[in-house]
Amino acid sequence: MTPLETFFTLDFPALAAGVLAAVCCALVGCFLVLRRMSLMGDAISHAVLPGLVLAFLISGSERPFTLLIAAAGVGVITTALIELVQRWGRVEPGAAMGVVFTVLFAIGVLMLERLGGRNLHIDADCLIHGQMEGALWLDAPATLAQLADPARYAGFPPQVVTLVIALALVVACIALFFKELRITSFDPALAAALGFRPTLVRYALMTLTAVVVVASFEAVGSILVIGMLVVPGMIAHLLTDRLGPMLLVSAAAALCAAVVGYYTGAHLPPLLGAPGALSAAGMIGVTLGAMLVLAALFAPRHGALSAALRRAALRIDITREDILAAMHRRAEAHPSAPHPIADLRAHAGGALTARLALRALRRRDEARADGAGGLELTPRGAVRARELVRAHRLWESYLVQTAGARADHVHNTAETLEHITDAQLARMLNQRTGHAATDPHGKPIPTQPTEADDA
Amino acid sequence: MTPRSADTPPREPPPASAFPSPASEAREDPAAFFARRPEHSPDAPLSIHDMTIAYHRRPVLWDIDYDAPKGKLVGILGPNGAGKSTLIKGALGLVPRASGRVLVFGKPYEKMRREVGYVPQRESVDWDFPVSALDVVAMGRYAHIGWLRPVSRAHKERAMACLERVGMADYASRQISQLSGGQQQRVFLARALAQDASLYLMDEPFASVDAATERAIVGVLRELREQGRTCLVVHHDLHTAPEYFDEVLLLNMRIVAHGPTRETLTEDNLRRTYGGRLTLLSEAGEALARRAPANPPPPTSAARRDQDAP
């Protein structure tokens, strides 16, 4: 066997099955994630089992269309049953799904046990992790030229054909009904008012879910498929904020996870000196999980780490402004006293925050070293410091005069609000407080040169 | 026009089996319907006839009879749980009607979807959804676009113009969770404008919005009125109602009164609207919910028709 022939016989079918299954599931899964219906993927992946066993018995796995039609039927029936149980049993959707999918799954297990052993090549193991590596391309091309030879395709793995059809169906449906899927997912009430039949679309989406679950079944089983439905959509939701890009990113994430998962499964154990290979489906699931963790940490807008960085930046910014205001107040009391850095550090929560805030002051040219181990305000810094103290004292006056707070209760509130007060808000505060000259503690409210005409 | 009021509870509560609408009446030709019911006008933007709505077989709105006046701003007022939102959803067919008929400009709603704009409550959607403000406004055009066809450039430009009208053009490409509550409400309003409808049903557009948004909404409402369009607006603030609305509809499980704002917002009417629950109706609703069989038998339509024939 040439390396190429080995690739086409062994690697290609498994890799293609993994990639196609992952991408199909990811695309449909995006809508499940957005509709908060992830559990529905779980329900359907289990509920399809009896239909799957029947379809295998009737046609064998060689006829993709029978399989997919059976899947579609099961999807509709499952969805309808869940709604019936919900209505008649007066339970919440989660309970209805739990009841329906476990009962259908149990029926499927019994059917598999009674009828499966002799006639089918699916068993309990296959249910859990699929048989991705079991796909073989018999009589595969040995050279690239032979790829064009139709005779070589007689032994093409049927699972891959099923998945190609499923992917074509999914892509066609999303492309054709993009607008309908978007409005029924986002605002079902408006969709119904406009005549876009959200119930019909929901059933269609469930049918499509059943189709991809069944098509992926042989590759990844009925447990791991849940992860493949939900995780790429979650990753993409963290990384994007438009529906189109979200679908593309989810497909890309699924593709990466499938390729990385397959090759690490096959080649990692030998590299580590361990015998055998790891389950490719299992590795894909693990890879997806790792990618989700990375996305949850590092996503630019929604990631935990990004959020922590933004919070830290805000803390530094507030410390910087607190130092400016403190310098202004010290200068009020002792106009020519220096500002030793050690004193200013007291206004920061931590040593690192203080150091970064001081650096920010210098970088923004709001303060500079006074040559004697202290800081002095630059003209630019003096303006900002004045604005902050002004905002602080205006808020104190406003809170006491208008909001009826006690004079000794307003400092902390003003301390927070001074950082978010812009010129317009300050002007309004000034008007509301009747252009007060002093704050409730008797300290003068600095005036703004630009607002001289206001007063 | 004098305010009409219906302070006496409507006819004694019908048995649960009589709630489903008489099928014959729901199918009746609108022309014949209006001939038989001269108190309703085929020109009314919205004509609600004897609508009762029940959740889990418990009526929350009883025997609503209402013709909306053309080219007016109408405020729908009432206490919490009075059925204000339900009135709108029932008129749009978003919640099943136990009985009654709704006609839009004299025709069934299903044929008049393009003439009706709807602004749902802001909390009714997931604002984390990956769409931009412009995407949301473009949804208002979907009824004009129809199934399967994509959103064309012309429709997007139209949506953009609607965003401009509510002062949100600068935020067109923002993902909607990055907008403030007031801005989100303005996006919803722009979406309604994009629907280019003759009748607007708005569910609490003024709920917890900033002063600038409130002014923007009022401005748009007045603009719509000048163009001869009709707006029914669920509202929660009695103080601003006289300033904002030409007419009001006072609701508390049934219509307490409706008509020109000044004449209708009387102390007496307000007391009847807000002064505690209508205990008899509530109790009757409870009793119906308790006694109604799980699957109601077929409607006894003849009896119901005879009972309220003119």
Image (cartoon, helix red, strand yellow):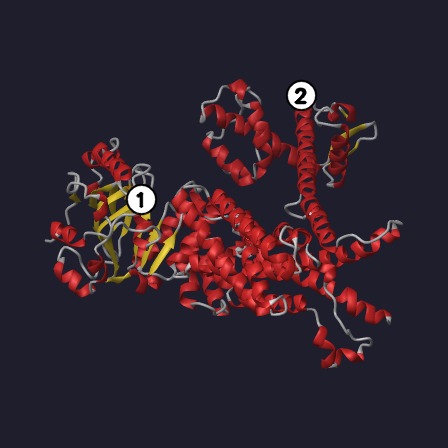
Mark 1 residue element: loop
Percent coordinates x, y for residue A443 in the rendering: 57, 22
Q: Residue at x 23, y 42 (%)?
A: B254
Real-space Cα separation, disc 2 to disc 1, in angstroms: 80 Å
Percent coordinates x, y for residue A116 in the rendering: 62, 57
> Which residue is more in the foreground, A35 or A99?
A99
Mark 2 residue element: helix
Residue B26: image tag = none
**Side of A248 where B164 appears, left or right:** left
User: Which label lies toward us, 2 or 1?
Assistant: 1
Q: Is residue A38 visible?
A: no
Give neighbour class at mark 1: few <14, some 14-19, many 20+ (Cα, 10 Å).
few
Q: Is residue A398 visible?
A: yes
**Residue picked out by circle 2:** A333
**Side of B221 where A296 appears, left or right:** right
Percent coordinates x, y for residue B126 in the rendering: 50, 48
**Looking at the picture, does residue A170 appear above or below residue B6?**
below
**Chain where mark 2 sits:** A
**Residue picked out by circle 1:** B294
Percent coordinates x, y for residue A398 in the rendering: 49, 28
**Chain where mark 1 sits:** B
Give neighbour class at mark 2: few <14, some 14-19, many 20+ (Cα, 10 Å).
few
Tell me which corner region of the image, top left, top right, bottom left or bottom right, holds residue A126: bottom right
Q: Residue at x 31, y 44 (%)?
A: B294
**Looking at the picture, does residue A392 appear above or below residue B160?**
above
> Which residue is more in the foreground, A6 or A164?
A6
Q: Residue at x 79, y 75 (%)?
A: A141
> Which residue is more in the foreground, A367 or B294?
B294
Type of amino acid at the residue the image marks with label 1: Ala
Type of amino acid at the residue the image marks with label 2: Ala
